[in-house]
Amino acid sequence: MRGPEVADPPDPPDPPDVPDPPDVPDRPDVRDRPDVRGRPLRALATDGVVRLRPLEVGDAEAQVAGEDDAMIRWLSDGRSTLAGQRRSLRRTRAAWDRRQPAFDLGVEHVGSGALVGTLGLDAGLDVLRPGEVNVSYGMYPPWRGRGLASRALSLGIGVAIDRFRPSLLVIRVDPANVASVAVATRAGFTRSHHTVDGHGALDCFVRAPVHT
Ligand SMILES: CC(C)(COP(=O)(O)OP(=O)(O)OC[C@H]1O[C@@H](n2cnc3c(N)ncnc32)[C@H](O)[C@@H]1OP(=O)(O)O)[C@@H](O)C(=O)NCCC(=O)NCCS
């Protein structure tokens, strides 16, 4: 026997239009990626064009390949070997991890992921006064002249402030090194004095530790 006819339930209303979620931008600046030993390796700072990151032993080949006469003359003590670079990178990585006063960081080109140079921070240099932090930099030859050292220096100033809370940032440069003087000046450092010490005859450029 058929019961009374029951009307079909009304169709549920259409769900309101929900806009597609926005594309999530690639954020290599905050993405952890493992180093050669599988430890997380967080980028420290980026402006979207370069980023600073801790160096690792696997950077030795790039370091040796990027070492030209200018690098040796102005930044290092002589031509390095692969084995020497590996030792030095191990040391500088440990110095960073252990919060020691002096270490180098890698400068990476965001677009290609290539290591393009290094930036050094040294709060323990023998000629500094307490509270001062020395900044140094070197870019591999193919990457020079594109403003990358200036970008790396600007990011490095931020790292120096965060890690050391310095009273003054210092760049010590041979006055004949016009490229380095230009980088320092462009970043707001001004010449403070000339000095002759165990590291050579150098102009000292200084800047207040202010984030840029
Ligand atoms: C110094 C060095 C890091 C500059 O790197 P870079 O990426 O070419 O520098 P940038 O492109 O950011 O240039 C910044 C400024 O320096 C100027 N500059 C760069 N190289 C120059 C050169 N050879 N001669 C004159 N000016 C130069 C640029 O024109 C720019 O000035 P601007 O803003 O007025 O245009 C690079 O030449 C290098 O690695 N040299 C060997 C290592 C070294 O000397 N380190 C410093 C030790 S104190």
Image: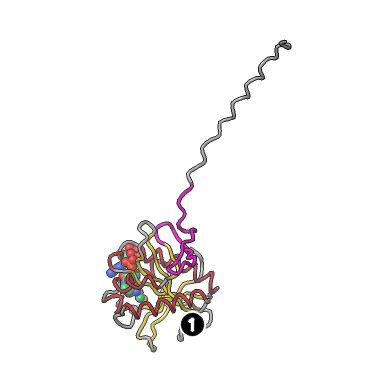
Please rate how many residues cluster around mark 1, counting C-alpha atoms within 10 Å: few if below 14, some from 14 to 19, many from 20.
Answer: some
Residue displayed at 51% across by 74% down: 97
Q: Is residue 193 magenta?
A: no
Question: Is residue 179 something that shows in the picture?
Answer: no
What residue did someone put label 1 on? Answer: 124
Residue 52: quarter of image: bottom left
Residue 53: quarter of image: bottom left
Q: Is the residue 159 above or below the residue 172 in the image?
A: above
Residue closest to the eye, 48 or 194: 48
Q: Position of residue 107 (x, y in %)?
A: 39, 66
Q: Position of residue 94 (x, y in %)?
A: 48, 77
Q: Which residues are magenta?
A: 24-50
Q: Is residue 28 magenta?
A: yes
Query: What secondary structure prevails in the magenta region?
Result: loop
- For the residue marked with disc 1, what is the amino acid? Gly
Residue closest to the eye, 34 or 149: 34
Quadrant occupied by the N terminus = top right
Q: Position of residue 66 (x, y in %)?
A: 30, 71
Question: Is residue 60 something that shows in the picture?
Answer: yes
